[in-house]
């Protein structure tokens, strides 16, 4: 029971957990910062579709309901992608520093923020993990640090680097359970002879360590889903990537078995996929942190 309240134990457990999203990607030869390269265009279209803009508005409205003000505020958007949040932040009058490393996403980001005046949106094409926060002058330099579903968060040390940049608020969103993907659930028994079972994700480490270390925060966990239609070829590529993340070999037998299933189950060549899961949102109030446990 003592270990339940020992922050050092939880920090080490998070660092050693081989099932975290980033660790699974790296162990399978996938660079977490480049996972969206091949689907940057479709991702951008989804984010700025009517459905995507409604989702973004819900999150921004939740932040505003918690007291976050954007007019004349400085915002650090880590993992900004194509500007799905940088754009509405700028629309509300914030000065945004957008950190992104994927070349195709950076090009889309530049296009999406081109209408704003000079200096309102600054793009930093560097890995956040490699930025020296004090040397860059970013220590407590931003009213809000915003990190949405970014692999930059992979242990407590990475959280501290993010918190170091925040003056008032820090928003972090992460998966609260393994992602749901209807096609993966369909083909999983074909390659494993077992049903697919979701697992809990590292959101639990984050919430428990914030609690143990005296941070004040609000949190919200929701279940969200969306449906998309892709070609059989795109579906095969996507499901094989997912299987690699679950440490299943990408060998010819599995590929042929899944391709055969797709041809039989989706004779039109169009595959409808439902994906989503449980997602956690955390807003940390830096000005309300316990003075006796301040780490940054």
Image (cartoon, rainbow, N blue to C red):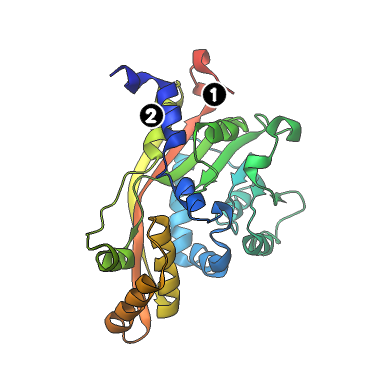
> How many numbered discs sit on the rendered protein?
2
Percent of width and height locating residue 272: 34, 74
State the residue at coordinates (39%, 39%). 203
Q: Look at mark 1 in the image and give the residue it sits on.
A: 287
Q: Quadrant of the C terminus?
A: top right
* 235 relative to 150, above or below: below
Percent of width and height locating residue 293: 50, 16
Q: Quadrant of the N terminus?
A: top left
Comes first in the chain, label 1 or label 2: 2
State the residue at coordinates (62%, 61%). 105
Report if residue 225 is visible in the image: no
* Farthest residue, direction right: 118
208 left or right, relative to 36: left
Q: Quadrant of residue 248?
A: bottom left
Residue density around tag 1, few if under 14, some if 14–19, many if 20 or more, within 10 Å? few
Q: Quadrant of residue 280?
A: top left
Q: Look at mark 2 in the image and give the residue it sits on.
A: 208
Percent of width and height locating residue 103: 66, 61
Q: Quadrant of residue 256?
A: bottom left
Q: Quick one: SS at disc 2? A: helix
* 154 relative to 103, above or below: above
* 45 relative to 197, above or below: below
Quick one: 189 or 49, which is closer to the camera?
189
State the residue at coordinates (40%, 62%). 249
Percent of width and height locating residue 291: 52, 14
Residue density around tag 2, few if under 14, some if 14–19, many if 20 or more, within 10 Å? some
């Amino acid at each position: 029971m003592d270990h339940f309240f020992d922050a050092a134990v939880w920090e080490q457990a998070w660092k050693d957990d081989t099932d975290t999203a980033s660790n699974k990607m790296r162990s399978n030869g996938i660079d977490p910062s480049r996972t969206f390269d091949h689907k940057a265009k479709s991702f951008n279209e989804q984010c700025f579709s009517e459905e995507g803009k409604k989702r973004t508005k819900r999150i921004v409205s939740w932040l505003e309901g918690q007291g976050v003000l954007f007019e004349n505020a400085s915002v650090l958007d880590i993992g900004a992608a194509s500007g799905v949040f940088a754009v509405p932040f700028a629309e509300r009058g914030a000065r945004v520093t957008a950190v992104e490393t994927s070349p195709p996403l950076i090009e889309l980001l530049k296009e999406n923020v081109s209408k704003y005046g000079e200096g309102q949106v600054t793009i930093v094409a560097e890995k956040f993990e490699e930025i020296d926060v004090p040397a860059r002058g970013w220590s407590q330099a931003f009213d809000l640090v915003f990190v949405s579903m970014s692999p930059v968060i992979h242990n407590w040390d990475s959280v501290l680097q993010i918190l170091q940049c925040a003056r008032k608020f820090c928003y972090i969103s992460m998966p609260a359970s393994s992602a749901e993907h209807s096609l993966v659930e369909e083909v999983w028994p074909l390659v494993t002879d077992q049903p697919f079972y979701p697992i809990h994700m590292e959101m639990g480490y984050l919430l428990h360590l914030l609690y143990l270390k005296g941070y004040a925060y609000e949190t919200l966990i929701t279940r969200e889903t969306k449906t998309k239609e892709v070609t059989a070829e795109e579906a095969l590529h996507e499901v094989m990537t997912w299987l690699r993340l679950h440490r299943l070999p990408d060998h010819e037998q599995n590929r042929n078995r899944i391709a055969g299933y797709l041809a039989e189950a989706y004779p039109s060549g169009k595959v409808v996929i439902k994906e989503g899961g449980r997602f956690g949102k955390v807003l940390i109030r830096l000005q309300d942190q316990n003075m006796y446990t301040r780490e940054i």
